[in-house]
Amino acid sequence: MLLIEEYVRLILEEEQSQNTPEITVAENPSYTYKELFDFFRFIKKGNNAKKALRFVGSVTGSSQIEDMLNMPGLTEEAASKVIETFCRKLNIPRGNPLRALAKFYGVNDLEGLKGIAIPSNVSNLIDDQVEEDFINDLLKDLKVKADQSPSETVDSEFVMNKLKAYTKDDNEKTRGSFASIR
């Protein structure tokens, strides 16, 4: 166990000593609905770090994180430290999964995470309150999807299709209008 903690400490020290962040998002990240939901659950409650670390490994494409996940003595504390570094480097807020999902979603002109982000021209057209309500619903949909299809990879059209369905519903906020990029 001390070996793993030492390994994590060395990785964190190396990242802090460099001017450029060590943790970056892979060009085409591939992650499952379960990994994504486990990450948001960690953001909210701070537990199950080892499960949430799978998402970080998938998003970054880091072989070091994959190696760490395969170590039999990996502790929740060590996994939590790596996730904290990931969140700090990418400015992902802790404690509120809705704010973290909004960051991945890419509200207005902010760049989002591939597979979750919607085009900025669509986001700019939607009222911020409608987007906030949609993100809240999206988190619930992710939980259902994670339970139903835990090993299914997040489809690049998933969020856009959910946004289209959400805005198409004849509700008070959207009046049956819907968002589409096609």
Image: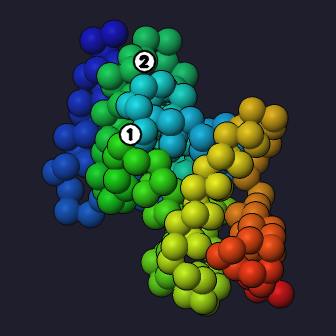
Disc 1 crowd, CA 10 A, few/some/many (<14, 14-19, 20+): many
- Side (left or right) of 172 relative to 18: right
The image's mark for residue 74 is 2
Q: Can residue 153 be seen from the camera position used here?
A: yes
Q: Can residue 66 be seen from the camera position used here?
A: no
On screen, residue 76 above or below 165: above
On screen, residue 29 above or below 51: below
Q: Nearer the viewer, residue 2 or 172?
A: 172
Q: Position of residue 85 (x, y in %)?
A: 31, 45
Q: Position of residue 150 (x, y in %)?
A: 75, 34
Image quadrant holding the C terminus, namely bottom right
- Side (left or right) of 25 relative to 10: right
**Could you tell me which secondary element the residue under label 2 belongs to?**
loop
Q: How is the image coloured?
A: rainbow
Q: Position of residue 20 (x, y in %)?
A: 27, 63
Q: Position of residue 52 (x, y in %)?
A: 51, 35
Question: Could you tell me the amino acid type at mark 2?
Answer: Leu
The image's mark for residue 34 is none
On screen, residue 143 above or below 162: above
Instruction: Kindly report the distance in space between the C-alpha atoms of the residues bearing marks 1 and 2.
Output: 13 Å
Please tell me which residue is depicted at 56% across the width and 42% down the height of the picture. 55
Tell me the quarter of the picture where residue 21 sits. bottom left
- The residue at which mark 1 appears reads as 83
Tell me the quarter of the picture where residue 32 sits. top right
Please tell me which residue is depicted at 57% across the width and 55% down the height of the picture. 136
Image quadrant holding the N terminus, namely top left
Name the front one of labels 1 and 2. Answer: 1
Question: Could you tell me the amino acid type at mark 1?
Answer: Ile
Q: Nearer the viewer, residue 37 or 152?
A: 37
Q: Earlier in the sequence, mark 1 or mark 2?
A: 2
For this orientation, the residue located farthest to the left is 17
